[in-house]
Image (cartoon, rainbow, N blue to C red):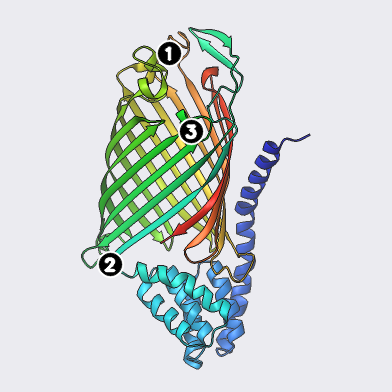
Amino acid sequence: MLSFRRISQSFLACLTAGVLLSGPVAAQDLRAERDRLAAHIQANPDDDQATYRFVVIATELRDYEAGIGALERLLMFNPNLSRARKELGFLYARLGNWEIAGQHLRAARDSGTLDPAQRAQIDAQLPEVEKRAQPDRLSIRLQTGVRSQSNANYFPAANLFQIGGASQLSLGRPRSEVNTFQLVHASHEYDFGGRGDRLETHVSAYATEQFNLPQYSVALFTGSIGPRFVVPQGMVDGLSVRPYVSGAVTLLGSTNYLNAGSAGASVRMDLAPNFWIEPGAEWRTLSVNTGRALGFGVLPLATLSTIATGEAVTAYVGSAYPLMDRVRLDGRFAYTRANASNAVQSSDQFDAQAMARIEVDPPHPAFARRWSIAPYARFTHLRFDAPNPLVSPWAARRDAAWTYGVLLEAPVTPMLGFAGNLEFSRNDSNLPNYSTQNVSVSFGPTAKF
């Protein structure tokens, strides 16, 4: 009988492949229908139903300018079409023209001719549009919930350990566990100057409370701040530079386990609406308390920890690409060189992440915001410089970690909703001590301000 894990893995693979493979075929059919409707409304500019259908297709194909042109032409013939004004506001918002978007949405809402479902759509989007039009913007997202794991103590999958090169069978076992969690993320942007320069600040806090394994409870605090300078358009269009500094503090159990500080810079290229590429580089220093936090004590046992006090340099590139209006692809590639005082803890790491965010209509018109389903995958390859004699005098550690899962975002009101996550993780190592598997499920309410 197929296990739940294998069935879920196959479902995630089919879902992702279906999105990526069906996109070009669907887009070709939509373009043919768009061209047919374009010819029709050119000859019949007052046909509002055909225009609305054209706008839906143009939006799905991310041809927002064509949709705007069709709606503005329709409003020239009938300025009282509140639905057309509502759709026009949403299209201007997709282009980032927040002030004009807000004007159209407020006019449509105040007309009094929209049905309750259309008014609910405006009420769900207008606060965010008005916030984005301000020079001083603060956004906060909160989530709390419950998480279940199959291997909360990260026990080796084969119950094997290597000690000094000899394999030993352990009497221990993976421990399943349930914990509560809290997540807070705040972003602040302050515009200065008149060309788009701004100061960006991000702060996050994440905490878990394990029910039966309190030594694995975690608290993580991170923050970054830095200006983003827009390169004048006479030189290069859609280019900005962001230097920044950041820091992180991690508590494991009741012990301050990790402190980190970093400085970096990135260059962002906006190639189209919602399509950008951002390469960058970052240097950071780490201070790790392996003794008290993990029970390793002093050297040489402290060398069993995966991370150690030292420095690291990371080069990365991130990108987002809207395959269609309801499907967005996100990706990130990074290489990190970590240097510790001991070669057995110095390493090279390659990391690749990908996500397909799919927006779907909610199950009831009372839910005015779209829901999203996001399958994702991550691969990490970790290679250490030298063997650790405590584990194996002959083989330096090599890890290949795979993580894949799916996220669900389900807004219920403009501020409140629910989010869930199903995730599988597997770390394959040439040393059995570090080969692990874990399945986790989390779910809880969210709030957005």
Q: Which mark is residue 387?
A: 1
| Quadrant of the rendered image containing residue 97 | bottom left
Q: Which mark is residue 380?
A: 3
Residue visible at 43% across and 84% down in the picture: 107
Q: Secondary structure at mark 3?
A: strand
Residue 271 lies, in percent from the top left, at 40, 59
C-alpha separation, residue under disc 1 versus residue under disc 3: 20 Å
C-alpha separation, residue under disc 1 versus residue under disc 2: 54 Å
Q: Is residue 38 visible?
A: no
Residue 382 lies, in percent from the top left, at 45, 27
Residue 408 lies, in percent from the top left, at 57, 53
Residue 184 lies, in percent from the top left, at 40, 50
Q: Say which label, 3 or 2, has the lower sequence index.
A: 2
Residue visible at 43% across and 58% down in the picture: 275
Q: Secondary structure at mark 1?
A: loop
Q: Which residue is mark 2?
A: 135
Q: Amino acid at mark 2?
A: Pro
Q: Is residue 169 left or right of residue 236?
A: right
User: Foreground mark, 1 or 2?
Assistant: 2
User: Farthest residue in the left direction?
Assistant: 193
Residue visible at 37% across and 49% down in the picture: 278
User: Foreground mark, 3 or 2?
Assistant: 2
Q: Secondary structure at mark 2?
A: loop
Q: Which mark is residue 361?
A: none
Task: Specify few, some or many for label 3: CA neighbours under 10 Å numbering under 14, 14-19, or 20 or more.
Answer: some
